[in-house]
Image (cartoon, rainbow, N blue to C red):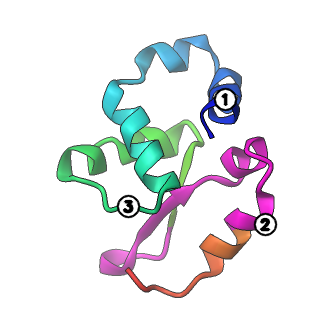
Amino acid sequence: MAELAVRFLERLGEQTLRSFATDDFLALDALHREQSLSPALKERLPGLISVGAVESVGRGRGVRYILSAAFHAALGASGTHTHKKGRPLDQ
């Protein structure tokens, strides 16, 4: 994942990448691995959503966060995004 993720992040632009903190990268990695996010990493989600790296699925208490369609496309796994977006709430 690392090399392809770097290519996606490069597409976001140098300015955006400079604003990324270590926790942003940790949050992306946790989402990719489908791991729970710590409160500190959850705080990073609005910024990751605003740059197009993450999407929210659902509303309220049932909201889930997944890597965006563009991120999955950069990983060569567009079908994975569709599968995760449509997956019922099980977390």
The mark found on residue 3 in the picture is 1
Q: Badge 1: few (under 14), some or many (20 or more) residues near its Cα, within 10 Å?
A: few
Mark found first going from the N terminus, 3 or 1 = 1
Q: Which residue is mark 2?
A: 79
Q: Judge whether residue 30 is colored magenta.
A: no
User: Looking at the image, which residue is at 39% across and 44% down?
Assistant: 27
Residue visible at 62% across and 52% down in the picture: 68
Amino acid residing under circle 1: Glu
**Magenta span of residues:** 57-81
From this view, report whether residue 91 is shown above or below residue 34: below
Q: Is residue 43 above or below residue 89?
A: above
**Mark 2 vs mark 3: in front:** 3
Residue at the location (33% across, 76% down)?
Answer: 60
Relative image position of residue 11 (x, y in whole percent): 71, 25
Which residue is identified by label 3? Answer: 35
Q: Nearer the viewer, residue 78 or 60?
A: 78
SS class, disc 1: helix
